[in-house]
Image (tube, rainbow, N blue to C red):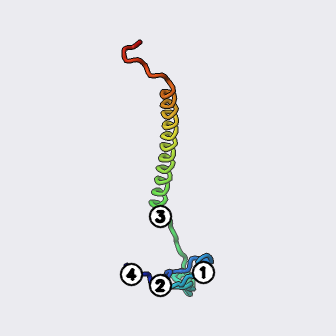
Amino acid sequence: MPKLARFVCLSSYGDEFARLPVAFGPQTIANSFGEYIASLGLTQLRIASTKMRERLEALRKQRVELEDAIADLERTVVVVDGMLKEREGQAPKAANGN
């Protein structure tokens, strides 16, 4: 496998990584689309995706349900483990019932 000759970040990622070389440094965008529309005296309408919000809420609910299921399983493991330890402490019963 060839050795990596050089590592370059696509963008800067803050002070912690300031020593790493960056391919595309910070840029300032002058006269962006929003600024251009505003300069014409027009207003803008920005709408958040309700579908995205619905999906995020569904994922959050699933995460909570999964966390609850994991907690239930952990409690079950503790109970079963306790039962097994109790059983190990008991003397084995005779095969003939005496």
Q: CA distance from mark 1 to mark 4?
A: 26 Å
Q: Circle 2 is placed at which residue position?
A: 6
Q: Circle 3 is placed at which residue position?
A: 49
Q: Secondary structure at mark 3?
A: loop
Q: Quadrant of residue 31?
A: bottom right
The tag earlier along the polypeptide, 4 or 3, is: 4
- Between circles 3 and 2, the one closer to the viewer is 2
Dot label at residue 18: 1
Q: Which residue type carries mark 4?
A: Pro
Q: Name which residue lies at 44% across and 81% down.
A: 4
The residue carrying pointer 3 sits among few (fewer than 14), some (14 to 19) or many (20 or more) residues within 10 Å by Cα, namely few
Say which quadrant the C terminus sits in.
top left
Say which quadrant the N terminus sits in.
bottom left
Q: Quadrant of residue 12?
A: bottom right
Q: Which residue type carries mark 2?
A: Arg
Residue 40 in sight from this viewpoint: no
The tag earlier along the polypeptide, 1 or 4, is: 4
Q: CA distance from mark 2 to mark 4?
A: 12 Å
**Is residue 31 placed above or below 17 in the rendered structure?**
below
Q: Which residue type carries mark 3?
A: Ser
Residue lying furthest top: 98
